């Protein structure tokens, strides 16, 4: 039985895998089992931000000599070190970290902390959002046809994220029943939707006035993706909670974190056991990732700005068969085609055959998330492939 057949039979998925059988990854490239080389403009969807095989992180994993496992009740020096390091870079006041295994768990923790801290049950999020696959995040998204028993009192506000949307959020928060407003500060899951500064300022202020927590889901945007270490920084936003995962270990091990302001953590007074939250090996990878960012942040973010400009210019000049809205923030790049179109999905298939990996998040939404370390020549080659596939 070949791998595709075995996968179809035993691995549960909504749709069959895309056919790329990954054997190896290196920098901005993924290689399949035949040795075919793909330029990777997905970075595993905002995971391998430093390119695959970052020496610092790989070295930390290779040299890891710590305990196999640490019981959550014990002290473990690297846990305290990692929490302190995150508190030093994440824009949350007097931050404390809850350990988690990934993004869904981090968001789930944020929602439960918000309920415990405020004594409220409501949530407001963006229409069409994605915050993970557990029932809390799914409740924010609101897919009641498939999951009828989602959390009650979840409200959604649709784009564009302008003054009118801000006014809708303000009205929803007025009654004092909403525990938290939750969003990605740059919405990667809606094709890199960029909120207006006014929207962010008004919503943050409304949260403060009504005692509602502002939860920034930086699972996808965190660690440089949008040109700042965290996307909240574009808006001088100081969220009550920041959720992290994906690039927190540069792709080397699973991890999530809910970074919560000290006041909120104290008011909530709750804990989360999380058996595998912050496994020692994952912590070694995350600490190495943070060390890398500590040393090379300016250099990486300068490259993000330069290559982001190049992507914007090239994409703006491309003869797409359909008119699309092109949105670029750092190296978070989204192209949205007309709602009923399946152009993005077809384009992603053609690119893959031609040796370029891009994501069609919906049939009409194409996203490009190249490694933040991508070189101009690789960016050029990848964009040449995309252009040939139009
Ligand atoms: C913004 C956002 N939040 C949360 C999640 C869930 O993260 P995980 O897949 O690690 O559970 C994702 C995953 O794509 C995401 O994009």
Image (cartoon, grey):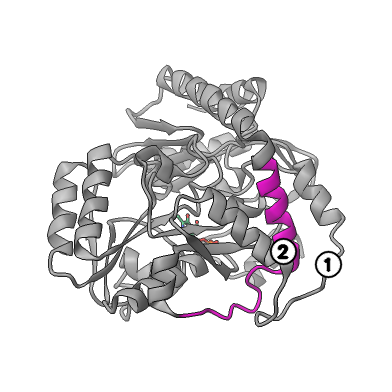
272 part of magenta stretch = yes
User: Circle 2 sits in a helix, a strand or a loop, which is it?
Assistant: helix
Quarter that holds the N terminus: bottom right
The image shows residue 80 at horizontal and vertical percentages of 65, 65
Residue 79 vs 345, above or below: the answer is: below
Residue 52 visible: yes
Of residue 294 and residue 26, the one placed in the foreground of this image is 294
Of residue 267 and residue 64, the one placed in the foreground of this image is 267
- Give the Cα distance between marks 2 and 1: 10 Å
- For the record, the magenta segment spans 270-292
Earlier-in-chain disc, 2 versus 1: 1
* Residue at 23% across, 52% down: 205
Q: In this figure, which residue is indicated by the disc labeled 2?
A: 78
Q: Which mark is nearer the camera, 2 or 1? A: 2
Q: Is residue 214 left or right of residue 73?
A: left
Residue 160 visible: no
User: Circle 1 sits in a helix, a strand or a loop, which is it?
Assistant: loop
* Number of residues whose C-alpha sits closer than 10 Å to that of mark 2, classed few (under 14), some (14–19) or many (20 or more): some
The image shows residue 390 at horizontal and vertical percentages of 47, 26
The image shows residue 369 at horizontal and vertical percentages of 54, 39
Q: In this figure, which residue is indicated by the disc labeled 1?
A: 66
- Mark 2–mark 1 CB contact (< 8 Å): yes
Q: Is residue 111 left or right of residue 39?
A: left
């Amino acid at each position: 039985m070949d791998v595709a057949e075995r996968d179809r039979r035993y691995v549960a998925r909504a749709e069959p895998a895309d056919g790329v059988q990954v054997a190896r990854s290196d920098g901005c490239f993924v290689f399949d089992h035949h040795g075919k080389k793909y330029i990777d403009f997905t970075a595993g969807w905002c995971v391998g931000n430093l390119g695959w095989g970052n020496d610092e992180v790989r070295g930390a994993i290779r040299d890891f000599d710590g305990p196999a496992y640490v019981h959550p009740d014990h002290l473990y020096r690297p846990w305290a070190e990692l929490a302190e390091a995150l508190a030093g870079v994440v824009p949350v006041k007097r931050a404390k970290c809850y350990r988690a295994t990934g993004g869904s768990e981090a968001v789930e923790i944020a929602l439960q902390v918000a309920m415990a801290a405020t004594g409220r049950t409501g949530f407001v999020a963006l229409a069409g959002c994605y915050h993970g696959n557990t029932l809390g995040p799914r409740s924010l998204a609101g897919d009641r046809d498939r999951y009828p028993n989602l959390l009650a009192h979840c409200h959604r506000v649709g784009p564009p994220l302008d003054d009118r949307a801000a006014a809708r959020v303000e009205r929803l928060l007025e009654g004092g029943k909403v525990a938290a407003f939750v969003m990605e500060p740059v919405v990667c899951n809606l094709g890199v939707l960029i909120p207006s500064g006014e929207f962010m300022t008004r919503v943050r202020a409304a949260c403060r006035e009504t005692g509602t927590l502002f939860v920034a889901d930086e699972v996808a945007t965190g660690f440089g993706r949008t040109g700042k270490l965290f996307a909240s920084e574009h808006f001088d936003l100081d969220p009550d909670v920041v959720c992290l995962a994906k690039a927190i270990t540069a792709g080397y091990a699973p991890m999530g974190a809910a970074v919560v302001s000290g006041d909120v953590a104290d008011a909530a007074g709750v804990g989360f056991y999380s058996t595998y939250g912050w496994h020692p090996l994952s912590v070694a990878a995350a600490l190495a990732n943070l060390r890398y960012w500590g040393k090379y942040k300016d250099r990486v973010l300068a490259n993000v700005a330069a290559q982001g400009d190049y992507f914007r210019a090239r994409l703006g000049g491309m003869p797409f068969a359909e008119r699309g809205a092109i949105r670029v923030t750092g190296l978070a790049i989204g192209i949205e085609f007309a709602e009923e179109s399946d152009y993005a999905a077809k384009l992603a298939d053609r690119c893959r055959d031609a040796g370029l990996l891009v994501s069609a998040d919906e049939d009409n939404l194409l996203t490009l998330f190249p490694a933040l370390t991508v070189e101009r020549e690789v960016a050029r080659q990848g964009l040449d492939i995309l252009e040939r596939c139009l």
